[in-house]
Image (spheres, coloured by chain):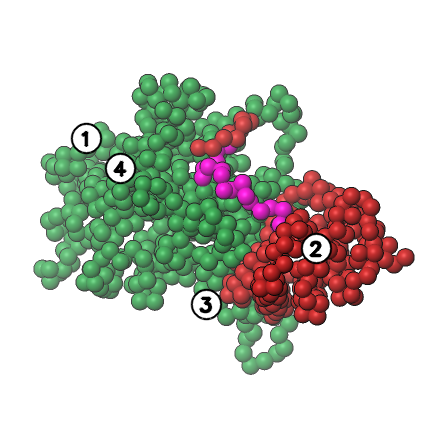
Chain colours: A green, B red
Amino acid sequence: MDVRAQLASVFHLDKCIGCHTCSLACNNLWTSREGTEYMWWNNVETKPGTGYPTLWEDQGKYRGGWELRGNSLVPRTGRRLGILSNMFFNPALPTMDDYYEPWTYDYEHLFTAPPGDTPPTARPVSKITGHYLDVEAGPNWDDDLSGSPIYAKNDVNLASLTPAEQEAMFRIEQMVFFYIPRICNHCLNPACLAVCPSGAIYKRGEDGIVLVNQEKCRGWRFCVSGCPYKKTYYNWKTGKAEKCILCYPRLETGQAPACFHTCVGRIRYTGLLLYDAERIEAMAKAPDTELVEAQRRLILDPADPEVAAAARRSGMSDEWLAAAGSSPVYRFVKEWGLALPLHPEFRTLPMLFYVPPLLPVAASNKTGSYDLTESGFFGNTGNTRAPLRYLSALFSGGNTGIVTDALARLWAVRSYAQARSAGNISESQAGDLLKKSGLTAETAGQIAALTSLPRFNDRFVIPPYRREVDIQETVNPQKHQGQTGFGFSRTPGRGL
Amino acid sequence: MIDLVLYGILPYLTVAVAVVGLIWRYVTNQFSYSSVSSQFLENRQLFWGSVPWHYGIILILAGHLIGVFFPRSIMAFNGVPVRLYILEGTALALGLLVLAGMVFLLLRRGTNARVRVVTTPMDIVLLVLLLLQVVFGIGIAIFYRWGTSWYVQTAAPYFWSVVTLSPKVSYMSSLPLLVQLHAVNAFILVGLFPFTRLVHMLSIPLAYLWRPYQVVMWHRRQQRGL
């Protein structure tokens, strides 16, 4: 057993209001530079929808992630020789048009326009070329536009639904959408890393953050197409790849990443997961529908004395073990089975988990009037607005059972909490649902508390990095105050 | 005198500039080593330029090196006329392929607004010099035939005379003007090497072929694979 720690995350989709505050916090910190204007290390997209970059989930187009060939796990991008032979032209690389051409507006014209019959307008101007631009796409072009035949109908995940189900999904009375905020998953089996010819990408052993060494990157661009989530980006100005760094300079000083910290809906949780590094490959080879279970098996219980002993052997401190013990992520993912990975079938073992949205059918008009009390409102997981098969295409590799279980538990918790606070459901009704979903009243109470009333330190359990202690033998930590976080103080230029 | 400067001094000067320049650039600014690809900004034209250019030029450079390192084998190979025709024909075809690629690349640099934004003056200088080099090479292949044979008896011994620090200038100075232009332009390209995007040639990631897929780094520990 080779126990390692991973700083993992949970996003609770029922709580996401789609406000994009996370995206802006990230953008202000990291990507408001020339060459990165188009990058959204954190983005929020509407589902059903095609996302950012357009159709990122379509691996027939971008060839990202892993595939099983016989019994071996191979990057879909290609084997090593195949990758090297495509270096002069990467056939699967998304181009700027697959994201969008960033723009600003010609505000100057508002001040300099000659007098005329109509008020002057500020035309959009490309941030790349400086030329006028007819804006045809943007990072959130289909925001809230679910039901639109132009965007949402092209969602790759709809392929698993029957035509009738698809049609039902887009009927105006039943229309459904929810938001998925996405950042780098800091995977256990990252494909971006595996296809990097320069060896510039690496996973940090201590906390599992995946980073690009800017000095070693040579701009071969395979990480961009190799990441099935399209969360590695190419800086067109410097000719280097960049990606979400999980705000490691903030983490190392005990602060939550900016997108977590600023989240208005408080949907984000972060904490440690312990896993067995020796079993990564075996677990990544599980059949599509068993991948979620395999990933759960890979995650170890920090309270298990054997695991703790193995963790100490591989150099983990007691403080980190304690942090793993109180990790909200461990509870959501392993103990409660509520949080699921996004597209586990890409086989990268993503370490960002989503609590699927409940989206109940809240009322019926069968009796001719708007009826909220239809029986089966609570606990009827077969009657969600988002079809189970759609959710399972997103979160469980097509395994509807896993999504049903999670939804049933969420439902039970909700009815339990309502029985106690609002009283519109009887205790016995709630008790039945709890029993059916396999939860005790105590667990339901804990889930409800961590879902609706968590405090800052409940949501973010960040282990102490003690980097200042590491360096103080050789360097005066005070000397490093105020230094740039990204690693160099030279203005990053293109070539020489 | 001019011959001595061009073939006795220039090669040493440009190689010295290249070596010192490369080390200086690597030590002071490793960040600048990149393919500085513009595929992200423009995809379609690049295919028709980059692919023929790279595959063609790699084979052509390999041919030049084989001539220098195995002159006798080349002579023996060319001893049968059919083989000589095939070799010459292949070389000329590759030359034309590379020329087409280079023309596409230059057109793309000039016409695409996004690509123009990331084009430096040095990119243009380099592209023009490379285009000239290709044109000279094709000219030689057409006007001074059987170059695969006479090359190994002139340029190859000249190369080794330079390597052994006793440059035999007469090997080159007696060759036709077109060949001399090809040689001098090559020296200039060597000298410019560290100051252009050509440095990406030194980043050919052969180590990728045998490194493990996953790379895990520990704070203040040796690197190790997964």
Q: Residue tagged by mark 4? A: A293
Q: Amino acid at mark 1?
A: Thr
The answer to if B208 sits in the magenta stretch is yes
Label 4 Cα neighbours within 10 Å, binned few <14 / some 14-19 / many ≥20 = some
Amino acid found under the numbered disc labelled 2: Val
- Percent x, y for residue A478? 64, 28
Q: Distance between the Cα atoms at labels 1 and 2?
A: 86 Å
Question: Are tags 3 and 1 found on a single chain?
Answer: yes
SS of the residue under disc 4:
helix
Local crowd size for mark 2, using a 10 Å CA cut-off: few (<14), some (14–19), many (≥20) = many
Closer to viewer: mark 1 or mark 4:
4
Spatial separation of the CA atoms under disc 3 and disc 1: 52 Å
The disc, 3 or 1, on the residue closer to the chain's N-terminal end is 3
- Residue A136 — which label? 3
Q: Secondary structure at mark 1?
A: loop
Q: Callout 3, which amino acid?
A: Glu
Q: Which residues are magenta?
A: B195-217
- Given the image, what chain letter belongs to the residue carrying mark 1? A
Instruction: Give the Cα separation between the discs numbered 3 and 2.
Output: 58 Å
Identify the residue position indicated by label 1 in the image: A440
